Every structure is written in C-alpha cells, then in structure tokens.
Image: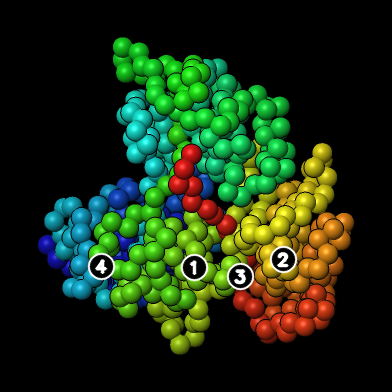
Amino acid sequence: MERGFEYVIVGGGVAAGYAALEFTKRGVSHAQLCIISEEPVAPYERPTLSKKFLHPESPARLPSFHTCVGANEELLTPTWYEEHGIELVLGTRVESVDVGQKTLLTASGETIRYETLIIATGAKALKLEEFGVKGSEAENVCYLRDLADADRLVNVMQSCTGGNAVVIGGGYIAMECAASLVTNKLNVTMVFPEAHCMPRLFTPKIASYYEDYYQSKGVKFIRGTILSSFEFDSNGKVTAVNLRDGSQIPADMVVVGIGIRPNTSLFEGQLTMEKGGIKVNGKLQTSNDSVYAVGDVAVFPVDLCGRIRRLEHVDSARKTAKHVAAVIMEPEKTGEFKYLPLFYSKAFSFSWRFYGDNAGEVVHFGDYLGTKFGAYWINNGHLVGSFLEGGTEDEFEAIANATQLKPAVDDLAEVGRQGLNFAMTGNKQIKSHTPSIEAGTSSPVVETPIYPWHATAGVAVAASVAAFAYWYGRRRRRW
C-alpha cells in the first residue's frame, strides 16, 4: 500500500494535537494532514497521567483529557479529527523514514509520502537495564510515560493499598508519583543519589521546603545512594529493593522515574543532531528544509539563555507545535520562535512555576515557613530566572514579565529585601497596556512594555514582545 499527504506528523503525543488544532485554524484542507502514532488513542494531555489520572477519587479518564483541554481550548476527540478531515493512523509504528525520498514505512508495510514532515516523536523512559539493573519486566515494577503505563500503575497501586511503594528517582515525575501514591494510602520511600530532590532546578533551600512537607505526609527520603538490585519471590514479583549502600527496603511495588531519552533513532544519519536531540533553527526547521521538529526532540535557540536548548515540558511541546503549524501555513507572516522557558508542578496543595534559566547567583525571598516564597537567579548582572510558590495569576505574570526583560541587578541584597515586589512594581508599569494571557498557559502577551528597570539599565525595550513565558523542563540523565 502507498498513499500521500501534504503534511505528515510522526508521533501522536501532546504536540501532535496542538499542531492539528493550529493547522485547522489556519485553513488546512481535508485530507491534507496525517498523524501517525504508536499509541492506540488520539493525542491526549500527558501531564494528567502523573496527576489526576492517579487520584483515588474521581480520577481523570479519556476522553476528558484529550488535547487541547490543557490550554483551555477544544477537546479533540477522534470524531473531531474525522470531522476536520485529518487522518489519524493509530497503533502504528514507523519502521523507517527516508527524508531524501520523503517517505515513511510503517510496521504494517505501508508507505506514506509527504511534502512536509513534522517530527513529534517525543521521548521514552530510561529503563533500569541501561544502568545494569535487571527487573523492569516484573509485574510490580512501573514506569510512567504513556497511557498504558498509567493504566498498569493504577492496577498495581490498587492491588497493594497499605503496602510499601519505593520510588526510584528524585525528579519531576518521581515527586508527583510519590504524592499520588501517598494519597492512595501507600507507604512511600524515595531513593535518589543526590543531596536533595529536583537538583537540576531546586536550590537546597527550596528542596528542603518540599521535602519537609512530603515527610509530614509520610514519605521517607533516602538520599546519596542508588538501587543496585531487586529481591524476587517465586512468582517473579519484587519483594525488596537493595541499595548500593547495603541497605534493603521492603517493596510491594516500585515506580521508576530516572529520566527520558528523545526518540530520534529514525533520523540519525539523516538530520543534524545536537544535545541529544534534533537541531532546528528559529523556525523549528531541521537541516532538511522539508522537515521540522517540535517538543522533546527539538533543540532550538533560546534567546534568554543565549544558547540552544532541548526542553522537556508540555508547554514547550504545545508552543513549538503551534508555531510550526503557523510557519508552514503562513510562512510570510510568521517569525522565529521566541520562547521563555517555563517549568511548573502541582502536587498536594502546592503550585509553583519557574521561568527562565537557573544560572548564576540565587536570591531567595518570601516566607519559607509559610505558603508563599520564591527565588531569583542573577547572571552577569541581570535577572535570568524566577521561581515562585503559591503565587496568584498576577504574581506569576509579574515574575514572567520580569524574567523576559532581564532587568539589570546591581544589589542582590536589595532584590532579596524587595522580594516579590521587585517584579510586581515593574509589572504595574505595563498594566495600562492590558497584557493578554493565552488561555491556560500563564503566558503573557505584552504590547509595548515599559519597565523602569530598563531606564536605569539604559536598555531600550523592543515594541511588541509576542507570546512569551513557556514551561520549563530539564532532562535528567542520571538518577
């Protein structure tokens, strides 16, 4: 079999759904767009899997979290794709891609031709075996990357209520899973080699706040060591976790969250690779001008950081997907992708956001014994990163605006004394310009912003800064 489409998206995750919606908004015709996905369901909001999907009461289930509800936009059910003439090829693995011939070969033997290809293949969870530990196939060892993983995790979790759960890893997914496991009445122990949780983003002071709260909920932390092996029963189920420091932890289930690796193997040797992903320019175009890359696999320029980055977060997936559809459909009207990294999480009663780059010196502010606190990162005399826990929408918007504009900072102690007011005072100067927030993204779109910081710094602000503040993500290679 062979068929062809004007536009093909390989990969059926979050980015595919948001790209599809943007294509329709910009006038794509019926039968022009095809999405090929290994998963058997239409694109969905992946962050739900580590949050509401695991809740013991009224858990989220499809179709309620298909894209694009995460940004308060349309719910794209399979019927929506059919009504808009978009071909969904589900449950289908792409075996090979020839970017020179503009063809894809599926596992079923079908050849699909394209004029323009969008790579949205996402990433896969790192397995224990890659670090020399056997046991991933045990029925009570779980990962969490896709819907099948989430279904399996829920089944295992419900089978051992009141039992012992060991979470391997101290990063974003591990922290959210630990919160969900405790909520489901399991005894949770987290194991990671670093001195504190979320080491690639959190400072020790920030990490200490969250670790103290998790411990008050019953979560135990074992830091500075790693998993070395499992103990199994006669049925092959894990019964205990052996650590490198010689200790052993009883386990009724294990959740592994030790990082991800971009799915780039189909394109190695055909496209330029860098930093573990596929290198693209400001318009998300790869080294082949008919191929674009978005989401976890894309390595793109981030102006605020002054370097190219590969960002693993849902906001990056959403925004790169929407931008690439605009670039393809309306190239003359669409500029380069301008992105302010944003990373966020919600667990227990917490809600925090981080904007920008965590480089340079850190200034903490706020009440670290209360519910609202934060930090600024100052690099080369300028604000480059901001973190806030417990903020209002106005406060999150303010730190996003401040980070985007990189005001000069001469006195770190004074910035710490001002705390959140440092950002809020500047933000008031642009209220008369009525910044708009894209639904569900906390991404301010500010026209003609004027900050007093820039008068003192002698920096002129460009008129019309469009669509900035985006979710931050960092890949964890080690655990």
Q: Distance between the residues labelled 3 and 1?
A: 10 Å
Q: Do the residues labelled 2 and 1 touch (CB within 8 Å)?
A: no
Q: What amino acid is found at the position of numbered circle 3 in the picture?
A: Leu
Q: Are marks 2 and 4 in contact (CB under 8 Å)?
A: no
- Judging by the rendered image, the residue that carries numbered circle 2 is 383
Q: What amino acid is found at the position of numbered circle 1 in the picture?
A: Ile
Frontmost residue, 42 versus 321: 321
The secondary structure type at the circle numbered 1 is strand
Q: Which mark is residue 308?
A: 1
Crowd rating for badge 2 (residues with CA inside 10 Å; few <14, some 14–19, many 20+): many
Q: Which of marks 3 and 4 is nearer the N terminus?
A: 4
| Identity of the residue drawn at 51% across and 66% down | 319
Q: Which mark is residue 304?
A: 3
Q: How far apart are marks 2 and 1 (CA)?
A: 19 Å
Q: What amino acid is found at the position of numbered circle 4 in the picture?
A: Gln
Q: Which of marks 2 and 4 is nearer the N terminus?
A: 4
Crowd rating for badge 1 (residues with CA inside 10 Å; few <14, some 14–19, many 20+): some
| Identity of the residue drawn at 74% across and 79% down | 449
The secondary structure type at the circle numbered 4 is loop
| Identity of the residue drawn at 59% across and 43% down | 198
Q: How far apart are marks 3 and 4 (CA)?
A: 30 Å
- Judging by the rendered image, the residue that carries numbered circle 4 is 270
Q: What amino acid is found at the position of numbered circle 2 in the picture?
A: Leu
Q: Which of marks 4 and 1 is nearer the N terminus?
A: 4
Q: Earlier in the sequence, mark 3 or mark 2?
A: 3
> Outermost residue, top direction?
234
Q: Quadrant of residue 223?
A: top right
